[in-house]
């Protein structure tokens, strides 16, 4: 097995995989329904091109030449996938600095009329996110720090509670996109079906959300100097068991922290 044919075959395979990735990400803008066909091109056809090219030019031990070349391109494809989906999104962040008055409740919450949401039998909560069909409402226990928060996913047409989740504090972030409630408690994320309230069944989820931190650059964080930052965006990829793929979806999310509401679109901060 000669080095030149091996190198040429590996380069051909990597180039093919890279072209497939560029077409999917840059030209087609990552449609979920095309992820698996392009994954076959990226993870399988590219390595096969390398393996068959090298094996055909190898005068002896063709199987060894095939598997070495196939493995090299497959490993390169895995590395590129990891960089694209797990590393680069960490440099795409939006944060707001919480002002000093976001430090807890002195009295019961009084959200503005646009944020107040009445839950029958429960009381008034804060409308964290919503669309025409679904509302994500947070009811906060303001009587004791760290202010436990209860999240209700509500069907707006009949005020039916689809899902309830209890958290130890009120650092809660949410948005609704394409029928999915993206909900975070600080840095821990949940995907919920906005129509049924059921958890979205995924076998892989990758996101860059950093929640509440002492820096607006958590990846390259310096001294916090007492400042507090809350992220209002996330890049999320998920692979569901039903075959649905959401590839690097960038979302702006509304947030609650202490006694403040943060608008994810504008960055506006208001007391509640």
Image (spheres, rainbow, N blue to C red):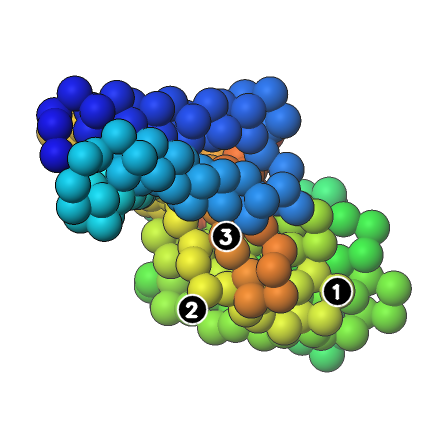
Q: Mark 2 or mark 1: which is in front?
A: 1
Tell me the SS state at disc 1: loop
Reading the chain from its start, which is encountered first: label 1 or label 3? Answer: 1
Q: Residues within 10 Å of mark 3 (few under 14, many from 20)?
A: many
Left or right, 150 with respect to 42, comes to right
Which residue lies at the image location 43% right of the left edge and 58% below the top edge? 204
Which residue lies at the image location 72% right of the left edge and 79% below the top edge? 121
Q: Which residue is mark 1?
A: 195
Instruction: Please tell me the numbered disc located at residue 238.
Output: 3
In the depicted structure, whether residue 100 falls above or below residue 180: above
Q: Are marks 2 and 1 in contact (CB under 8 Å)?
A: no
Instruction: Please tell me the numbered disc located at residue 167.
Output: 2
Left or right, 70 with respect to 244, comes to left
Left or right, 41 with respect to 129, comes to left
Residue closer to the observer: 52 or 190: 52
Residue closer to the observer: 50 or 22: 50
x then y, percent, for residue 135: 71, 57
Q: Residues within 10 Å of mark 1 (few under 14, many from 20)?
A: some
Asked if residue 257 shows in the view, the reply is yes
Tell me the SS state at disc 3: strand
Which residue lies at the image location 47% right of the left edge and 73% below the top edge? 166
x then y, percent, for residue 62: 22, 44
Q: Residue furthest front?
A: 59
Q: Quadrant of residue 161?
A: bottom right
x then y, percent, for residue 78: 31, 42
Q: Calculate the distance from the C-alpha at mark 1 to the C-alpha at mark 3.
A: 18 Å
């Amino acid at each position: 097995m000669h080095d030149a044919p091996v190198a040429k075959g590996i380069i051909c395979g990597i180039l093919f995989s890279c072209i497939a990735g560029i077409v999917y990400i840059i030209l087609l803008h990552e449609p979920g329904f095309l992820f698996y066909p392009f994954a076959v091109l990226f993870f399988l056809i590219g390595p096969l091109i390398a393996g068959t090219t090298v094996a055909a030019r190898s005068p002896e031990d063709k199987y060894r030449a095939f598997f070495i070349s196939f493995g090299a391109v497959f490993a390169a494809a895995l590395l590129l996938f990891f960089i694209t989906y797990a590393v680069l999104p960490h440099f795409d962040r939006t944060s707001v600095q919480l002002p000093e008055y976001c430090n807890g409740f002195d009295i019961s919450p009084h959200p503005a009329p646009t944020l107040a949401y009445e839950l029958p039998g429960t009381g008034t909560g804060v409308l964290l996110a919503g669309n025409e069909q679904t509302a994500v409402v947070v009811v906060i226990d303001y009587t004791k720090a760290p202010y436990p928060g209860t999240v209700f996913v509500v069907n707006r047409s009949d005020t039916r509670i689809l899902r309830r989740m209890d958290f130890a504090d009120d650092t809660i972030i949410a948005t609704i996109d394409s029928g999915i409630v993206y909900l975070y408690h600080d840095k821990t994320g949940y995907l919920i079906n906005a129509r049924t309230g059921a958890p979205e069944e995924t076998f892989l989820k990758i996101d860059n959300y950093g929640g509440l931190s002492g820096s607006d650059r958590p990846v390259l964080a310096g001294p916090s100097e007492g400042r507090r930052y809350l992220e209002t965006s996330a890049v999320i990829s998920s692979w569901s068991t039903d075959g649905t793929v959401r590839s690097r979806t960038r979302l702006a999310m509304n947030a609650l922290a202490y006694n403040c509401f943060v608008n994810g679109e504008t960055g506006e901060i208001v007391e509640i």
